[in-house]
Amino acid sequence: MNPIIHEITASQVKKDITPFKVGDGVRVHTKVREGDKERVQVYAGIVIARKGHGMHETFTVRWLSYGEGVERVFPVNSPNIEKIEVERESEPMRARLYYLRRRTGKAAVAIKEKDRAAEIHAEKVAAASKAAPAAKPAPAKAAAKPEAEAVAEAPAAKS
C-alpha cells in the first residue's frame, strides 16, 4: 500500500477490535438510525470470510433465518459497529467457509469447534495451585499426629 495512503487511513483504523477468525460464532452489535432515534441491533452468526487489510478490511457473517441463509458484510473499522462478541471459537480448516452456503438445517452451522478441554484443565490447575500452598502445611502436621497416637495405642491394645 502507498505509504501516504497508509498514513492518512491509520488514524481511522480501530485499535480495540475483538480478535476473531473465520469459523467463529459472533454477535455483531451495530448502530441503527431510524429517524432521529438510534438503537443497537445485534446480528449473530458464523464468520464465513475475512477480506482486505487496514482500513478496507471486511468480514462476512452468515446466519439462518427460517431455514434461509442470510449473509451480511461488515467493515471491521466501521463507526456503526459498536462491538463484536465471540460466542464460540472454532478450528477452521479453510480461509473461507463458502461451502456452508450449500448446506441446510443443522449442517449449515456445523463447524469444528475449538476443543476447550485443555484450557479448562489449565484454569483448574491454576486455581488449585493458588489454593494448594495454604493447604499443604496443615495436612503435614495432621499426618504426623496420627502416627504418634498409633504407636501409643498399639501397646495398649495388646494387653
Image (tube, rainbow, N blue to C red):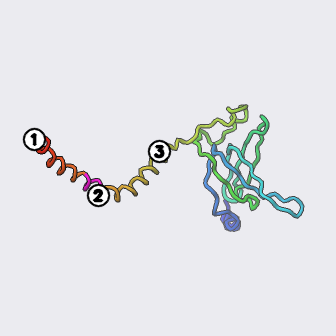
Q: Is residue 150 above or below residue 101?
A: below
Mark 2 and mark 3 in contact? Answer it, CB < 8 Å: no
Residue linked to disc 3: 118
Would residue 66 be found to the left or right of residue 50 on screen?
right
Label 3 crowd (10 A; few <14 / some 14-19 / many >=20): few
Q: Which of the two marks, 3 or 1, is nearer to us in this view?
A: 1
Magenta stretch: give its range. Answer: 137-142
Front residue of 110 and 154: 154
Asked which secondary structure carries label 3, the reply is helix
What distance separates the C-alpha of mark 3 from that of mark 1?
Answer: 57 Å
**Residue 40: where, in percent of width, then height?**
77, 57
Q: Which of the two marks, 2 or 3, is nearer to us in this view?
A: 2
What distance separates the C-alpha of mark 2 from that of mark 3?
Answer: 29 Å
Determine which quarter of the picture holds residue 96. top right
Q: Main secondary structure of the magenta part?
A: helix
Residue occupying the point 14% across, 47% down: 151
Residue linked to disc 1: 159
Front residue of 142 and 24: 142
Asked which secondary structure carries label 1, the reply is loop
Residue occupying the point 65% across, 45% down: 25
Front residue of 29 and 139: 139
Q: What's the amino acid at mark 1?
A: Ser
Residue occupying the point 46% across, 51% down: 123
Q: What's the amino acid at mark 3?
A: Ala
Asked which secondary structure carries label 2, the reply is helix
Determine which quarter of the picture holds residue 56. bottom right
- The mark found on residue 137 in the picture is 2
Residue occupying the point 22% across, 50% down: 146
Q: Is residue 130 above or below residue 110?
A: below
The quarter of the image holding the N terminus is bottom right
